[in-house]
Image (cartoon, rainbow, N blue to C red):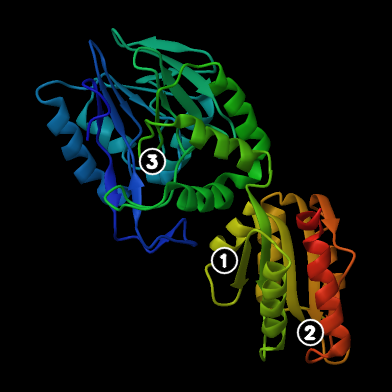
Amino acid sequence: MNISDSIKYIGVNDHKIDLFEGQYIVENGMAYNSYLVLDDKIAVFDTVDSNFTEEWLNNLKEQLGSRKPDYLIVQHMEPDHSAGITIFMDTYPDAVILSSAAAFNMMKQFFGQDFSDRRILIKDGDSLSLGKHSLTFVSAPMVHWPEVMVTYDSYEKVLFSADAFGKFGALDVDEDWACEARRYYIGIVGKYGMQVQNLLKKAAALDIETICPLHGPILHDNLSYYINLYQIWSSYSVETDGVFIAYTSVYGHTKEAAKLLAKKLEENGCPKVAISDLAREDMAECVEDAFRYGKLVLATTTYNAGIFPYMKEFLDHLTEHNFQNRTVAFIENGSWAPTAAKNMKLLLEPCKNLTFAQNEVHIKSALNEESLTQLEELATELCVEYHS
């Protein structure tokens, strides 16, 4: 796969992986992207996961032919992109590494050496000429590690974007970009919205025609679509107008309430309603939906004087990833001392700019006339703007 006549793709697909970063389900695998720029001088952008270094080196050698690389540009030191550094440097003893000071410190930690005799330290705004290709390095700390740099090639107007604009899924699988890019962004990068905003401001000054991320497909067409989604995600704005109901249920009564609310929301004109059982569905997908929709309903049982474990885990994920700027409503169940709503609010205290719905639903064991009325009132409140 070629990006252009002089920029080649040399990455790999991983269909052996079950959990990315030890936690994210990736049914369609992962891509570890690496790129080669052929000019008077030759530069390689990043390496791949340790399980695929031999395949990656073969891809590199095939594209190089009789030539040898001059530079290895290390934009990100996460092991799925840096595991091949040592074998590359052993294979090409005349090559030089370009990276940030923080990245060289991490090389020392990972590999026991920082290649002090074969390196060029780069910082924000530095440039490198390969011939026709002129590379400018842009610092992107905490997107999503502190050492990250991205690189802009002014000759072909390509942004090598490190983990920004990445997604789950191997490149030989056809799937919707936004769904898996959203789950990837929120789970892995989402805590660092301010830092992503800073990078987007820098990128706005560049004339970009192609984005080459370290995961997922190369982006050529309609770049404004992808950039706009990153603006929404990194500013914690609402992407989809609607309500997401996240519930846990022990014996089915809380589930019944959650599903009945979903029905009432649709009847009241809510444009989109999504609902998930936190105990049975992919937690990362549920977290993704909480960030996607403008309103969130949390429905759970009181459990050991607190809340059900899967709901607690869900709320921990939200707070860890800077959940904010949303309307939140509560449905609680408890047979003798319901405290779930109070405890959920306490767990959400670190979140900024949350608006709590005035109406709450309090179930004692099972729905009755009083809690059904509360459910109806909550549905009306959450849909009031759709009747204006």
Q: Nearer the viewer, residue 10 or 113?
A: 10
Residue 190: % across, % down: 61, 46
Label whose residue precedes the other's in the sequence (1 or 3) = 3
Please tell me whether mark 1 or mark 2 is closer to you in this view. Answer: 1
Which quadrant is the N terminus positioned in? top left
Question: Disc 1 marks which residue?
Answer: 283
Residue 315: % across, % down: 71, 64
* Picture disc at residue 81: 3
Per the model, the C-alpha gap separating discs 3 and 2 is 43 Å
Please tell me whether mark 1 or mark 3 is closer to you in this view. Answer: 1
Residue type at tag 2: Asn
- Element under label 1? helix
- Element under label 2? loop
Taking the image as drawn, is residue 131 in sight? yes
Question: Disc 2 marks which residue?
Answer: 304
Label whose residue precedes the other's in the sequence (3 or 2) = 3
Label whose residue precedes the other's in the sequence (1 or 2) = 1
Residue type at tag 3: His
Is 14 situated above or below 251?
above
Q: Would residue 67 appear left or right of 278 to someone viewing this image?
A: left
Per the model, the C-alpha gap separating discs 1 and 3 is 25 Å
Q: Are marks 1 and 3 in contact (CB under 8 Å)?
A: no
Per the model, the C-alpha gap separating discs 1 and 2 is 22 Å
Residue 331: % across, % down: 79, 75
Is 14 situated above or below 307?
above
- Element under label 3? helix
Q: Nearer the viewer, residue 29 or 238?
A: 238
Residue type at tag 1: Met
